[in-house]
Image (cartoon, helix red, strand yellow):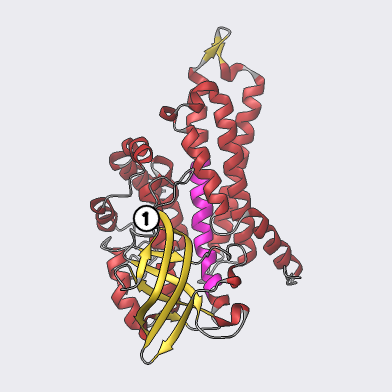
Amino acid sequence: MQLRESAGAVADRYYADKALEWDAAATHLPDEERRRLGELGYLGIAIGEQWGGSGGSLMDALVVVEEVAKRCSLPAFQIFEANTGPARVVELYGTEEQRARYLPEIVAGQATMAISISEPNAGSAATDMLTRGKVDGDTIVINGQKRWCSGAGAAEYYLVYLRLSDERGAAGIGAVIVPKDAPGLTFGPREQLMGFRGVPSADMFFDNVRVPASDVVVPAGGFSRLFGAFSIERLGNATMSLSLAQAALDRTAAYVQERQQFGRDIVEFQAVQTQLADMVMQVEAARLLIWRAAMSANPLPDVGQVSVAKCFANEMAKRVTATAMELHGGYGYHREYHVERYMRDAAGWAIAGGTPAIQRTRIASEYLGRRFGQRR
């Protein structure tokens, strides 16, 4: 409770009043604010103390993500990436040298590491990726193209999933760290997205990019480990959805008790009460599903529980923000009231990290103990 209250107080002090401004201008989180998050300890909540973090639990990190994201998504995205994103892959599977080199920078807010998985023809079917890293002495030479990298062009480092052997499918896939300034790495124009307006997204082009072989985090054949770790990121994703829905619920609860029609507060109408009650139930259910999955982490959370939490939270956020807009009437369509921003971002989180359709396949697979091939 104390962690939740302190995170909320920090977000109220520094970020709540910036949300509309940063969204309208599609502003990337300023470097000084990233450093502030590092000084506050928020970028290392779930990172080990030996790397400058607090050594806290995944649950601790998710609580802070939720509280900050309810006020402003940009700093919350940074907290989400540091505690549930590629830095955790480095902590779990990287070498001692990699951890010592990259994690303290990330925890201090001096650098960001983004994840790069998708390609033009490899989205949900991630194992169709073609980007290739060939061993040349003590270096890896990378060629290919990546798409939908959140943070592309802004982050200092990228955890790139790619083919490190000639084996087909998942067997040939591993991951390597690539710095932003690596010769041969270029970025396409920033994508103009419906939401996530302060989080840059762009294509990445690798033209004989050379990185030390020592920066391979997971070798070929480690795809299952990579996507096991990705379950942590999916819980961060689900928490971002939860935060949008909770924020929409909070604003709607206040609005329906202030707005009057036909001579009385609109909350006096039973139809409004019913819609508000449905919003409350959906938000609370999503939070409990996320917490259940987070508490299963040892160190990785249960994959099936994560998919249930993410699928439910993603779809719940879209429903709840849509109801919030309906109850706000015309004001819900106005930028000043925040609700339209919540709706835009909710749609994005449902796509990122594996769509609800993909999560349903995973849920059925885990529940039945069977694997379902999607290829003909």
Q: Which residue is mark 1?
A: 78
Amino acid type indicated by mark 1:
Gln
User: Does residue 214 sit above or below 108 in this rendering?
Assistant: below
Q: Quadrant of residue 111?
A: bottom left
Q: Secondary structure at mark 1?
A: helix
The magenta segment: 226-245
Q: Residue at x 75, y 72 (%)?
A: 370
Q: Residue at x 63, y 29 (%)?
A: 275
Q: Residue furthest top?
A: 263
Q: Quadrant of residue 267?
A: top right
Whole-percent x and y of residue 234?
53, 59
Q: Is residue 340 visible?
A: yes
- Dominant SS of magenta comes to helix
Camera-side residue: 232 or 144?
A: 144
Q: Residue at x 58, y 76 (%)?
A: 224
User: Does residue 196 sit above or below 275 in this rendering?
Assistant: below
Whole-percent x and y of residue 192?
44, 46
Q: Residue furthest front?
A: 207
Whole-percent x and y of residue 334?
46, 26
Camera-side residue: 150 or 342?
A: 150
Q: Quadrant of residue 92?
A: bottom left
